[in-house]
Image (spheres, rainbow, N blue to C red):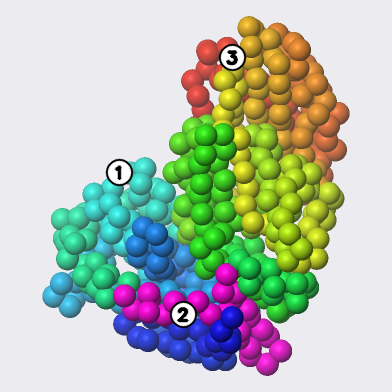
Amino acid sequence: MPSPRNEIRFLLNGMDVRLDTVGAQETLLDFLRISKRLTGTKEGCAEGDCGACTVLVGRLSEQGLRYETVNACIRFLASLDGCHVVTIEHLRGADGGLHPVQRAMVEAHGSQCGFCTPGIVMSLYALWMETAEPSDAQIETALQGNLCRCTGYEPIFKAARAAAALGTPAADPLALERADVAAWLEALNDGRRVDLCRGEDRAILPASLTDLSAVLAEHPEATIVAGATDVGLWVTKLMKPITPAVFIGHLPELREIKRTGSALKIGACVSYSEAAPALTAAFPHLESYWRRIAGWQVRNMGTIGGNIANGSPIGDVPPVFIALGAKLHLRSAEGCRTLALEDYFIAYGQQDLRAGEFVEAVELPLVQADMRHAAYKVSKRRDEDITAVAVGLSVGVREGRIVQARIAFGGMAATPKRAQAAEAALVGQAFAAESFEAAARAVGEDFAPLSDWRASADYRRLVAANLLRRFWAEQGAGQVAKLEGV
């Protein structure tokens, strides 16, 4: 194996950047503002919520060079090896003046104090590059992760609609430069491990999946960093050291999505955005649920494996995947093993993960006949908010009777957990309102939830019962139009 490389290399706007002194905890936002004085990118919340720090990051994939909006405040600098970072300063029109999106924001009066404006422009820019004439729903999705406390959103929506008349994506400098940038990034891919330090702060980027196993065997105490949407807050909010940190988001083996005749297998570093097309094609009931997970930037960064691996009781992915009968693939230098996803969660902060082991993929059996599915999320704010209660339901019905039930909740216990008493109240019973009423009563036996600032224990118990009633109203009674959210 070649010797490790001791520098990261990436493209920043039009600049070739090479850094040999980088710690695990340094953020892209601090690098841009402090080291490069690119102060158009703002720090608002420092936790990936407000979008004021939004930039684009381009990376090579099997589909070519792809740009995504990300939150620079929680994106670690070490993870950018082989990427193209685009900030607000790089935007320009064909004449060298304002970009069409910027002109549209000015003409629609889409800015007041201006603090959030660069992040909003970058989100609308990414949308404009993908869809020059977006629908209102697409604009809403693009702006889920951007908060504005001055203007209100109507002028911003007007700007998003008007940008197409002021310029075309095909003439955008980023589009015209794409082939050259892709060639430059390809040339950086030398297949070597990257090992960086700033004092005692160390970051490692393994060269391959096999190399990752070797690194973790050598450093079992290391912090594994995939999308950093959770680990980023450990640093920016908790001031928690994460060294040595092993970054894995660049490994192509962990970014694969494979569909066979019987299962859908999703690599641990597949992001929410990348997973959405294959996941919602196989499980249509997840489409509206998936849009409720965070905002666009976080869905571009956050990974399926990371949401599972950190073991949070309020993670959005585990309840719906447990209900679908998911299996988890784990790997280490000692070999591979597979276990039911629900068995991975042992207790609060404790998962069935051995020293040197990491999540490689999650596997979902494809929908079987006679199964009815639903996924619901309850939160204080509809978009970009943390779950108070989430549930996945998979109910098998044959000849009018319930033959199978898998119901898993998040936010109701110290781990994502199945509602076994509610399941038992359903199996063998008629597919009828009375059965779901019995299940709604039984779910109180399954959980003793806590009260916190997101919801009280009584509210959680009531919501859990009502979500079972909602399932019947939508799937059985057929008398209530399908609700959009809760």
Q: Residue furthest front?
A: 1
Q: Residue at x 47, y 42 (%)?
A: 278
Where does label 2 land, which residue? 190
Q: Earlier in the sequence, mark 2 or mark 1?
A: 1
* Quadrant the N terminus occupies: bottom right
Region in magenta: 183-208
* Amino acid type, residue under disc 1 in the picture: Ser
* Amino acid type, residue under disc 3 in the picture: Gly
Q: Residue at x 28, y 59 (%)?
A: 129
Q: Earlier in the sequence, mark 3 or mark 1?
A: 1
Q: Is residue 191 magenta?
A: yes
Drawn side of residue 295 relative to residue 349, left or right: left
Q: Reply above or below: 375 against 46.
A: above
Q: Residue furthest left?
A: 95
Viewer-proximal residue, 333 or 283?
333
Where does label 3 land, which residue? 476
Alpha-carbon span between mark 2 and mark 3: 56 Å
Residue 110 visible, this orientation: no
Q: Reply above or below: 296 against 418.
A: below
Q: Position of residue 359 (x, y in %)?
A: 68, 57
Badge 3 local density, few (<14 within 10 Å), some, or many (20+)?
A: some
**Mark 2 touches mark 3? (CB < 8 Å):** no
Where does label 1 land, which residue? 135
**Element at label 2:** loop
